[in-house]
Image (cartoon, grey):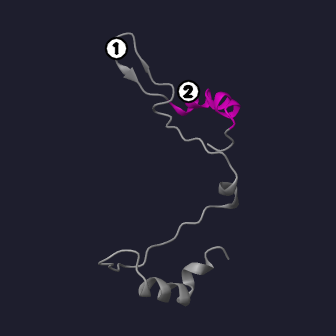
């Protein structure tokens, strides 16, 4: 229902009649991605397991983080108020 305006012929006619910029061009159809309900109110935090928990080994070699080391940060992320990883 929220995306119904995208299919409204009157809207497309209005946009075609009063373009927002000069030299408007058209291209093929582009899919629309609509998030799930959770995206409307969830607080999202994104991090990469390889970076999370990465460290320097004794010889200076970088050791990447793993899912296990990333899991150790979950409580800290939750304490910041995030509820979706």
| x and y percentages locating residue 22 in the rendered image | 31, 77
Residue in front for this viewpoint, 75 or 6: 6
Residue at the image point whose x is 68% and y is 49% from the top: 42
Left or right for 48, reference 26: right
Residue 76, x across and y down, in percent: 65, 28
For the residue labelled by badge 2, is the local secondary structure a helix, a strand or a loop?
helix
Residue 33 placed where, x, y %? 54, 66
Question: Is disc 2 surrounded by few (<14), some (14 to 19) or many (20+) residues within 10 Å?
Answer: some
Residue positioned 40% across, 80% down in the render: 19
Q: In which quarter of the image is the C terminus?
A: top right
- The quarter of the displayed image where residue 67 is located: top right
Give the residue at mark 1. 60
Q: Which of marks 1 and 2 is nearer the N terminus?
A: 1
Q: In which quarter of the image is residue 21?
A: bottom left
What residue sits 35% from the left and 80% below the top?
Answer: 26
Residue 69: assigned label: 2
Label 1 to label 2: alpha-carbon separation:
19 Å
Q: Answer whether residue 70 is magenta in the image.
A: yes
Q: Main secondary structure of the magenta part?
A: helix
Picture residue at 49% right of the left edge, 86% below the top: 14
The span picked out in magenta is: 66-81
Q: Is residue 54 above or below residue 3?
A: above
Choose between 47 and 2: the one closer to the eye.
2
Residue 12 part of the magenta segment: no
Q: Looking at the picture, how far across and down is residue 41, in whole percent? A: 70, 52
As drawn, the label of residue 79 is: none
- Asked if the residues shown at circle 1 and circle 2 are in contact, with their CB atoms under 8 angstroms apart, the answer is no
Q: What element carries label 1?
A: loop
Q: Return the residue nearer the eye: 62 or 27.
A: 27
68 over 17 or under it: above or below:
above
Question: Is 66 displayed left or right of 28 in the figure?
Answer: right
């Amino acid at each position: 229902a929220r995306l119904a305006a995208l299919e409204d012929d009157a809207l497309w006619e209005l946009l075609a009649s009063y373009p927002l910029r000069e030299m408007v061009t058209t291209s093929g159809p582009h899919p629309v991605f609509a998030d799930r309900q959770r995206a409307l109110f969830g607080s999202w935090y994104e991090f990469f397991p390889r970076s999370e928990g990465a460290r320097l080994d004794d010889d200076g070699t970088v050791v990447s983080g793993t899912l296990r080391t990333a899991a150790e940060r979950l409580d800290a992320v939750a304490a910041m108020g995030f509820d979706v990883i």
